[in-house]
Image (cartoon, rainbow, N blue to C red):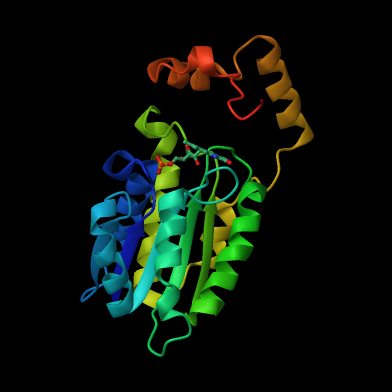
Amino acid sequence: MRLTVFNGSPRGEGSNTKILLEHFINGFMTTEGNIYELAYLSRVKESDNFVKLFREAEHVLLAFPLYTDCMPAIVKTFIESLEPLCGKKGNPDIGFIVQSGFPEAIHSRYVERYLEKLAARLGCRYKGTVIKGGVEGIQAKPARMTRKLFESFYQLGKTFGETGKFDEQIVRKLAKPEKLSRFDLWILKLLDKVGLANSYWNTMLKGNNAFEKRFDKPYII
Ligand SMILES: Cc1cc2nc3c(=O)[nH]c(=O)nc-3n(C[C@H](O)[C@H](O)[C@H](O)COP(=O)(O)O)c2cc1C
């Protein structure tokens, strides 16, 4: 099987998407004869090549982080660049991976509906959307905390490489929790009260010199 993979994270080679894809591809490549090609949508200067890659692809996997309940601008730009291929004969099969910061899969269900519709409009056979929440922070976590997640993506890639489909059981497992339980919410409120709920995000803001600006409302007159 020939798989063309698009990494839609603006973080490119430093992205969480890259890490998850690496495990997926390692699994995919265990089937003899499988080959893949990988493109980073963050390399915007190569955008003409993205359309060519898509047009010539057999199976496409588009993976991206959830941005403001939808997709990053580079992914939307890529999707719009495919407009001339809408409904063309010979378009590839397409599957998606959407991973997000919030742990609940429900945040990604709207973009999932969009992606299914997109596949239909392009005239691509839709292979499904893999949703995984709670991904931000994986690069800071010790190996024992990410082992299961990476193994799941490896297995997902392996079965995809063998069957050309996402394994339904793995997809269902990855999408947990759909929504946080009352108990989880209670814990979250508690962490918020003691100032721990935002500590990771505050560190990120400080690292980007944006902490002081966190309540800015630049569009309010
Ligand atoms: C501008 C921006 C918007 C985001 N919006 C959301 C969001 O709406 N929901 C969510 O769960 N995570 C959101 N996130 C978190 C990312 O989805 C998450 O950090 C992801 O793992 C980043 O993956 P990457 O390293 O591959 O880019 C957002 C992150 C950024 C930078």
**Side (left or right) of 119 relative to 84:** right
**Is there any visible trace of residue 29 in the rendered image?**
no
Q: Position of residue 130 (x, y in %)?
A: 51, 59
* Vertical arrangement, residue 80 with respect to residue 100, above or below: below
Relative depth, front residue between 197 and 68: 68
Q: Residue at x 32, y 78 (%)?
A: 55
Relative depth, front residue between 47 and 26: 47
**Side (left or right) of 111 relative to 203:** right
Q: In what quadrant of the picture does the N terminus appear? A: bottom left
The number of numbered badges drawn on the structure is 0
Q: What residue occupies the far right of the structure in this picture?
A: 182
Q: Position of residue 45 (x, y in %)?
A: 24, 54
Q: Residue at x 54, y 54 (%)?
A: 131
Q: Position of residue 110 (x, y in %)?
A: 65, 56
Q: Residue at x 29, y 52 (%)?
A: 44
Quadrant in which residue 109 is drawn: bottom right
**Is there any visible trace of residue 69 in the rendered image?**
yes
